[in-house]
Amino acid sequence: MKQIACFSVLMLGFLLSIFSFAVCAEPPMQPFYAAVMKMAPEGKLGQVIKQEEVVTAVKGAQAWRIAYISSDVTGLKTIATGLVVAPTSPAPMGGRPVMSWGHGTTGTAQNCGPSQIFNPVVPLNEYFLLGGNSWSDYGIPAIEEFIKEGYIVVATDYQGLGGGGRHQYTIATSNGMDTINAARAAGSMSETGANKKTLIYGWSTGGGAAIAIAGMPDYINQTGTAWDNLDVIGFVALAPEDISILVPPGKLNQAAADKYFADSQKMFLNNVFNFTHTAMFYWGTQAAFPNLKLTDLFMDEGAKVVNEILDNKCMHASSDTFNFLYGSSYATLLKKKPSNTLAWTEAMLKGGVLSVKPLAPVQIYFGSKDTTVPPIMHKIYQEQVCKLGGNVGRMQLPGEQTHFTTPGVSRPFYLSWIKDRVAGKPLANACPKS
């Protein structure tokens, strides 16, 4: 039956020698998402095409699951799902601002969207930390504080994580489009009482989405959407990821592309956890640019294994599966000498964060002990866009913070920064002095 995921119980040695590549069914889906996956991506950007109420214990809050129209880096319309949370009190004169949250890595299968978790409207709950109670990160950072302040919060799942299609993991432009179209969706709902003030905040790959959409003023300012004329007041990026920033500067040629692949693989193939992120990055890039082939980068066995795992499992289950099947030999799934690297690098640059002056101020928070998203990524970003006249601040958090402690430790800092932007307080340019 289609609702039953296929599985095999085999000894490890047998798996390594004659692994079976039977086609598995789609992961089991809740009725809301199963219905959305049958819908066509037709309508205005940000148009809500399905919604249902969600019970939440957040004081003074009401919430909905939504499916809405978005688009991707190639211009194709997509469907994304997510959550909208708004105060239950009457909206004030002038309406409420909208905070749009971009989550970090959860996985690539259809059932990896954070809105699908039982009781999803809670403060951020991290898999890695004490107190984490799930197989995946879920929840919305500072949701209680934002509701208390009278803000609306919308949290996208991104396309491919409950709305059909293949998830374009780490394609920052596509994920960024999902965050701004989520804000349009929340604003268009009569139940929320929104005004046009909009702020994007995100962590990890969601931080990359935030700085990506910051450099897409034409996309933000286009008309004919479900909620035109957004007044974007700021972008907050918690340890933002953008692997494309590591492409060597200057003219892109074959030598530069080969160097980029060699350097990035050296940086991110040191353990199975980072390998899983890398495999997802390649898989997500190929999802966005189907002219590329996974067999350019993976051995035939590797391409089959990666497709089966990432089609069906979320991040940490995927990492566990790679570890179970291959142990420390996971890198053998990759070709020693990848092919077509120039086309892959061009695609990664197109899907990455553009070097464009941000539409509004950007504030980045990071930990000195972040080995998942090396701080050099957003340091280069800051240097590039500050030269273009942008206002980009970077704050190293106190203590020795990792990638996974960054959201919690940064909260009091970004809450203050956001409150000042909503209040319209002046902000000095935070770019480093020459």
Image (cartoon, rainbow, N blue to C red):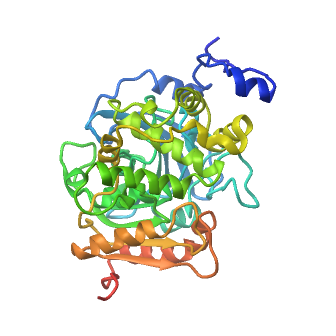
Which is more toward the observer, 242 or 216?
A: 242
258 to 78, vertically: above or below? below
As drawn, the residue found furthest toward the right would be: 11
The quarter holding residue 39 reads top left
Which residue occupies 60% across, 26% down? 27
Which residue occupies 73% across, 55% down? 132
The quarter holding residue 337 reads top left
219 to 159, vertically: above or below? below
Which is more toward the observer, 148 or 179?
A: 179
376 to 12, vertically: above or below? below
Which residue occupies 39% across, 63% down? 92
Report how many numbered discs are placed on residues in the image: 0
* Res 118 visible: no
Left/right placement of residue 218 relative to residue 49 reads left
Q: Split into 4 quadrants, where in the image is the C terminus?
A: bottom left
Q: How far across and how far down the image is residue 330, in percent?
A: 64, 41
Q: How far across and how far down the image is residue 386, in percent?
A: 28, 75
Q: How far across and how far down the image is residue 66, in percent?
A: 46, 38
* Res 179 visible: yes
Q: Split into 4 quadrants, where in the image is the N terminus?
A: top right
Which is more toward the observer, 194 or 417?
A: 417
50 to 381, vertically: above or below? above
Q: How far across and how far down the image is residue 202, in percent?
A: 47, 59
Left/right placement of residue 358 relative to residue 103 reads left
Which is more toward the observer, 356 or 244?
A: 244
